[in-house]
Image (cartoon, helix red, strand yellow):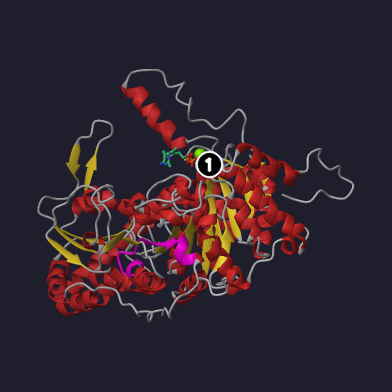
Amino acid sequence: MSKPKQGQPETGVNRRSFLKGTAAAAGAAIAGATQLAQAAEATAEKIAPGKAAAEKKLPSESFITNPGSDFMADVMRAVGLQYLAINPASGFRSLHESIINHLGNKDPEILTCMHEESAAGIAHGYAKAAGKPMGIMMHGTVGLQHATMGIYNAWCDRVPMMIFASNGLQADKRRPGVEWLHSVQDCGALVRDFVKWDDQPTSLQHFAESCVRARKITMTAPMEPVMVMCDIEVQEDAVHGKPRIPKITQLTQPQGDTAALREAAKLLVAAERPVIIADRACRSQEGVKLMVELAEALGAAVVDNGWRTNFPSTHDLELSFMRQTLVRDADVILLLEVNDPWGNLNSMSDPYKVARPIHKPDAKVITIAMQEVYLKSNYQDIQRFMPVDLAIGGDVEATLPDLIDAVKRAMTSERKAAAGQRSAAIAKMHRQMKDRDKEASANGWDASPVSTARLSAELWNAIKGEKWCLAMSDRMSWPRRLWPVTEYHQMLGGTGGAGVGGALPISLGAALANKDKGIITVTIQPDGDLMYAPGALWTAAHHKIPLLLVMHNNRCYHMEIMHVQRMAGIHQRRQDTCHIGNNITNPDIDFAKVAQGLGVWAEGPVTDPSKIGPALKRALAEVKNGRPALIDVVTQGR
Ligand SMILES: Cc1ncc(C[n+]2csc(CCOP(=O)(O)OP(=O)(O)O)c2C)c(N)n1
Ligand SMILES: [Mg+2]
């Protein structure tokens, strides 16, 4: 509510007396209107400070100068939270005020989000780029319900995140009306299937211990989101006694069993055609280095499925896009934190669902993973059961040094010679694969709408001189095929749970974490995904998050068109109707205008491929000045 500007006519009815009058007329039972009247009173006090206070002076014992929320904010700082992504809400008004006035809005700093799903997505991307959790604070029930999809994506992508949700546990202390609507008996029930742990602390000491515990749990592999409730009474009541923040634990990751690793090394060294497949194996550049050491010691081909950067795409032993051929010929297959072992080693026809193994029946399969250490039953992100020969529980990056050591010990000169010969043959396949990719990328080079290969090539050309990160590296396969990837931070994978709407906020979170490292973050942004919660663009502009967004604007939910077309084919019916329900046209969305309206520098739509390069140059200049920028490119399907 704002005071009328000078020169503007007052509305006929005085708003304050109108609201008060309404409340009186409807009787004291109409709680919502009463609250509005109180809000109007508070606003009047803001506008004319002192007047309302003079009318109604609070006795000094009414002040709470040591609210519990100050201590809770201290706890958030102690567990290392640099940011807290929120959509504001009365359920955590006390904590909100403590963070800005007690902590000075620093460590954590508040990020204003326009949708709770965006807050969760930002924390998700931040965790992948920063290697540590961000906090998000949700309004109990309503806010948390909005956040669920983002939390599920993070769960599937195995990232740490600290979720806080407000709740009013004590019924006799709830304000009538909204505070009841926004409180629950069991807040965690809503997300318990896809968070690693949750707790509902009922005292400040309990809150401190639970937060320190939560940090430890979320940062131990398999890393997953955790949630701690912030009870309204605990926040708003004064501190009683002397709550203490427990010591923050120094963590190490669980390592695979040494005897089992020796067994694995024996199998791998004896293999004629060993293959390594990695999903979310690495957490840092150190992991990538170890992967190279292992592959070179074995002379083994590596398939990086791309959910993190696990292996340099420039390395001679990299054959990521030849998985089927490699698996078909392999005698020993090592799966490193692979989420879907069955899906990597078998095929299933669609839509007939005929399953067929790709691997040889006697191929030995070894897994190193943490995912079996921690599972939930309801959501089925565990994929189909795959019998394996040796399953080693352990974090891959922590386990690789011992495995490499065991491989080197098991190596003989004869096996070394075999590995050398094999490496040369794999290197030849690698070069041929890269040549094929380059050739294929030239198809439709000058086409309009722009081909996805051309879009990728133009983007690469714009950023190749920078320290770069492609926040969403799974939107199309071309960047992984064409760009030279050597560093862990360069490609961060996908949304995790394939929940559309995640790409935009996850990219933003990554850009936020990369901001202070001098890394330019770019993303290939699908149109359908952006429109779930485009308000995240405002957050990028407001908080000056330097992200270069290149729209992959195919003006449709293209993936779904392909599904409906497949069904029409099987049903022996017409194909020309399959765009219905899938096209995002008529009207075409003007993404440059959408972005500009939300405060983001933008250009487009670009339909001529030769104009992409110059547009990207202008956008990059904006990003280098610390602001987000968007180029809308009208593209072909996928
Ligand atoms: C939350 C959610 N709703 C619906 C889907 C189904 N879905 C899968 S891909 C897709 C199309 C997404 O469109 P866009 O982001 O433009 O990407 P495109 O397929 O066009 O490249 C949809 C709707 C989903 N995966 N997640
Ligand atoms: Mg699309």
Tell which of 67 and 606 is nearer to you. 67
Residue 617 drawn at (x, y percent): 67, 56
Which element is circle 1 on?
Answer: loop
Q: Amino acid at mark 1?
A: Ser
From the viewer's perspective, is residue 491 above or below residue 495?
Answer: below
Q: Give the image location of residue 279, x and y in percent.
A: 32, 58
Q: Quadrant of residue 544?
A: bottom right
Residue at the far right in the pictured view: 7
* Residue 473 visible (yes or no): yes
Magenta residues (range): 217-235
Image quarter for ligand 1 equals top left
Left or right of 622 in this view: 267? left
Q: Residue at x 61, y 71 (%)?
A: 101
Place of residue 296 in the rendered image (x, y in percent of width and height, measured from the top left): 28, 71
Image coords of residue 612 (percent x, y): 63, 48
Can you identify the residue that label 1 sits on? Answer: 451
Give the vertical position of 449 relative to 457 (above or below). above
Q: Nearer the viewer, residue 572 or 48?
A: 48
Magenta stretch contains residue 224: yes
What residue is at 39 percent from the left and 74 percent from the top?
205
